[in-house]
Amino acid sequence: MQVRVGTLGSRAMVAALVALLGGCAGSADGDGKKPASASADAGDATAGGADGKRTAARGGTIGAAGSACELPVSFAVAEHWKAKSVDAGKEPSTSAAGGDDDLAGAVADALLRQGPVTAACEIDAKPAGNIGFLRVWTGKPGNADAAGVLRAFVAAEDNVSKAKYHTFRTGGGVDAVEVEYLYTSKLLDETKKESAFAVGTPDGPVVLHLGGMDTQEHEEMRPAYELAKRTLRLA
């Protein structure tokens, strides 16, 4: 499971700790069965978008009131992926930690905050057969510069290279900025591909990030990310 750099300084070290704990906010069912999707949307067959990129079969929609994650935007979740809200306000804080709680607080900070945004939702790919998450991060109202927020998000991550940015419009008509880049784990001595895009909303910026254990996992999960891009609209 991928996490973010915070006070620990090493994202890979935090990832190892979190992997042992089973993740911060949800995981696949213990019996390996694929549960029902996040909402009752009808599933679509896997198909290509207007740009020819593959999109996953639709399994549900999140973002609106009453969905698994209430967000400033809404978008379709891939079939079998499991969405769960992340309440950063209820996690331990390093400022109030002491003793062994220092590590727990540092892990929480690393997981839940990156640059100007805070984790709000994670969508687990394990029920669909992959190891990784599509995570949603939100910022404070009034900071709607999608490009600046995305650059700050990437800058807050150590060991990033070859970042390439471009603009596009989501299928729901929202202007967005996307980045693709490489992250190198010094602990594991390996480099993998990651992708993210950001939009501005009246309620603040939103970043969707796709990681994965390695580049192969990232590419296998990419159709779920493309589905989010194709369907994202203001909630």
Image: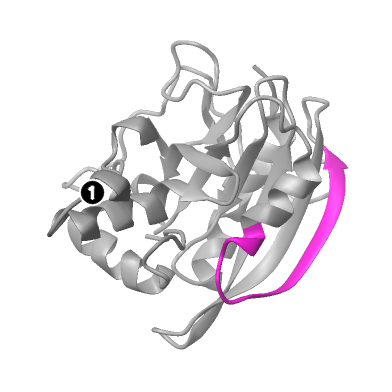
Q: Residue furthest bottom?
A: 189
Q: Residue furthest top?
A: 65
Residue 79 is covered by the magenta coloring: no
Q: Position of residue 116 (x, y in %)?
A: 60, 45
| Residue 198 position (above or below residue 180) | above
Q: Is residue 104 visible?
A: yes
Q: Main secondary structure of the magenta part?
A: strand
| Residue 50 position (above or below residue 66) | below
Q: Which portion, as a residue range, is magenta? A: 154-169
At a point 65% along the width and 25% down the height, the residue shown is: 141
Quarter of image, res 72: top right
Which of 12 and 103 lies nearest the eye of the viewer?
Answer: 103
Q: Is residue 89 left or right of residue 102?
A: right
At a point 25% along the width and 44% down the height, the residue shown is: 96
Q: Position of residue 201 (x, y in %)?
A: 72, 25
Which of 215 and 204 lies nearest the eye of the viewer?
Answer: 204
Q: Is residue 27 visible?
A: no
